[in-house]
Image (cartoon, rainbow, N blue to C red):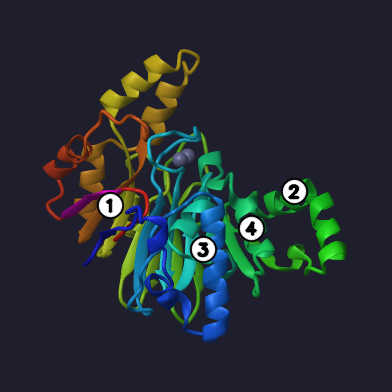
Amino acid sequence: MQHRELNEIAPPGQLTLDATIDCWAATTTMQHNRRQFLTAASLALSYGLITRLVVSQERKGTRVILLGTKGGPRVGESGRSNPSTLILINDVPYVVDCGYGTTRQLLAVGVPLNRLRYVFITHHHSDHNLEYGPLFYNAWITGLPVRVDAYGPPGLELMTRDFFNYMKFDIDTRIVDEGRPDPRRLISAHDFNKQGVVLVNDDVKVSACLVRHPPIKQAYAYRFDARDRSVVISGDTAYAPELAEFAKGADVLVHEVMYLPGIEALIKRLPNATRLRAHLLAAHTAPEDVGRIAAQAGVKTLVLSHFVPGDDLSITDNQWAQDVRKHFKGQIIVGKDLMEI
Ligand SMILES: [Zn+2]
Ligand SMILES: [Zn+2]
């Protein structure tokens, strides 16, 4: 088990090829790989992200990287981006949720955007889908060579079509003017409306479990069973014993968490959000209950993510974890953006 902080800031001169070039060599030539790196690096630089990219010694296996850990739709200044989790299986990216900032976070961990292949949306709150269309657009404009498959609750197919209408002028212009392929043929959106197996390929079986996130009825957790590891992402949910059953024996459970004293402080800062308190309590999980779920599931490692509130810097890691520990005796990781588990 390894987890590393990947968000160390490197001086510009240290953004070197040798630290990054070995990420994505499996199926490409060295020349192509160098071009991919340069594209990613120049985009990262153009976004002002002077960030050390992921150093990957081994290309096989299953890696989990937290891209965005701040629950809720507000874009904060806390150092936490909006929700998204990356699972790399044999170097193929599986992106779970597309909160605002997902594109930039993928670049920050050294994933070239044109390597996008699979996207999973847990539910249609905007902190989970706001950048769904733009992420695909950014992959297309970076030279996406293969089709992207996207999975989510009902509404995803419509949202995909609506996004292309929203961007119709630009897309149609670039197809003619720049000779680009039609992006509408490069994505397949798949709605599903019941739990069960969502995807099976040579590397992984992905299944979904209905969770409790009122008033949204179609909210799911995902489980990735790869050859070497099993990883469960809770999505947004209130305490849900069925999730513990779904996560049984997983190596890693990434679970959302809500800190009640922080909620009270949050409500005070948002005078118009009179219903927000009731929504949060009904739709999210307190630390003690997160511990119960992890213990019932018997997972090895519990990762806290989707922090609510996610931009209150006065809440310490220990405060997030202390009530979890009452029930769960395994490894607890208080998630940070760009952390690898
Ligand atoms: Zn959320
Ligand atoms: Zn939600």
Q: Which residue is mark 4?
A: 138
Check disc 1 and give the amino acid type.
Val
What residue is shown at x 17% (from left), y 55% (from top)? 331
Which mark lies nearer to you, 3 or 1?
3
Where is residue 110 shown, x and y percent of the image?
Answer: 45, 64
Tell me which image quadrant ligand 1 sits in.
top left
Q: Nearer the viewer, residue 235 or 30?
A: 30
Q: Is residue 173 magenta?
A: no
- Distance from label 1 to label 4 (Cα)? 29 Å
Specify start and end residues of the magenta stretch as a single range: 331-335
Q: Which quadrant is home to the C terminus? A: bottom left
Q: Pointer 3: residues within 10 angstroms few (<14), some, or many (20+)?
A: many
Q: Main secondary structure of the magenta part?
A: strand
- Determine whether the beta carbon of the residue marked 2 sits less than 8 angstroms from the nearest atom of ligand 2: no
Q: Which residue is mark 3?
A: 41
Residue 46 image offset from top left, x and y in percent: 56, 53
**First in sequence: mark 1 or mark 2?**
2
User: Which of the marked residues, 4 or 2, is nearer the chain's N terminus?
Assistant: 4
